[in-house]
Amino acid sequence: MTKLRIAFMGTPDFALVALKDLVAAGHDVVCVYSQPPRPAGRGQKETPSPVHAWAAEQGIEVRHPVSLKSDEEKQAFADLDLDVAVVAAYGLILPKAILDAPKYGCLNIHASLLPRWRGAAPIQRAILAGDAATGVTIMQMDVGLDTGDMLLIRDIPITGATYANALHDDLAALGGEMIVEALDKLPKGDLVATKQPEDGVTYAAKLERAEAKLDFADDAVSLERKIRAFTPWPGAYFELGNERIKVQAAEVIDQSGAVGEILDDALTIGCGSGALRPMRIQRPGKAAMDTDAVLRGYDKLAKGVVLG
């Protein structure tokens, strides 16, 4: 292995896995870039990102500019004299001067099979769309939005039991393995750059809280996917009066009934097509529980009730 001089640019837990793998592989991570600390928790205390916190613990220099567009930031990055920068869910646009500064440019760990699901929320969008597979692409970054040449690509199946939180962890682990492999091949010239095809481009828009509401006029299959895609955040839900009931697991039932109506004592709910039976739900201020435990003594979710 050739020890490379690296800047790592990432923010959430997804990125932290790759950073740890690069350090464990023996590369020289000379600087970490991450989003600035944000208010978090009940006290809204300024809290560093997972990548920032871990890097600081390891004694790695951490920078968190709000932008990389200024001449000062571009020069500070160039002065690092890097072999390569590795980017994973960083959250800032990299200007061309940043992309061009390292000897081998900037490599991105992207959680989809490009060109499908360019953009902010590829994991959730793949589940929502009913894709049979997703994966990780190691990409040579350019000035476009996830448009650069592909260097490595590996897939992971999506099944009817795939939830976003578990898929996130699997893809993070795969991304860490792949970036270590890519950096081993990079100085040897063993990476083959492949242009992304023009066909099949889709965009994974950022998740919005408003999307999480279950509209029972939709078909049951799509609603069940939404529940899996939005676990743990923002959490799929339906409204019952003033209560917002979160649904953490459900199954599709071959049954028909009025849209939004509870059809039986197992909380099977009529949909635009088919029916949905929540298997695990959470009332406000309560722990998540199996649905049958919640229903005992809770007549608001009874047969014949119509949900909003």
Image (spheres, rainbow, N blue to C red):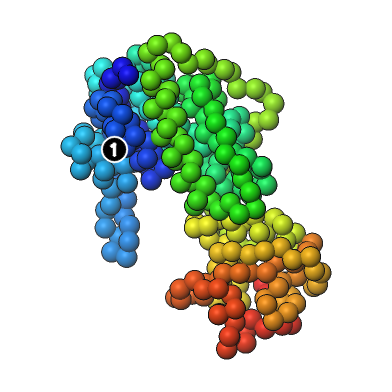
Q: Which amino acid type corresponds to the residue marked 1 in the rendered image? A: His
Q: Residue furthest front?
A: 1
Query: According to the image, label 1 marks what residue?
Result: 64
* 188 relative to 53, above or below: above
- Residue 94 is at least partly visible in this image: no
Q: Secondary structure at mark 1?
A: loop
Q: Residue furthest right?
A: 256
Q: Position of residue 96 (x, y in %)?
A: 42, 20
Which residue corresponds to the image point at 61% horizontal and 29% vertical from the top-left?
Answer: 115
Which residue corresponds to the image point at 49% horizontal and 40% vertical from the top-left?
Answer: 171
Q: Residue furthest top?
A: 189
Please tell me which residue lies in front, 301 or 189: 189
Please tell me which residue lies in front, 82 or 157: 157
Which residue corresponds to the image point at 21% horizontal and 33% vertical from the top-left?
Answer: 61
- Name the side, left or right, on which 269 lies relative to 204: right
Mark 1, other Cα within 10 Å: few <14 / some 14–19 / many ≥20 = some
- Name the side, left or right, on which 196 lies relative to 94: right
Q: Position of residue 140 (x, y in %)?
A: 47, 21
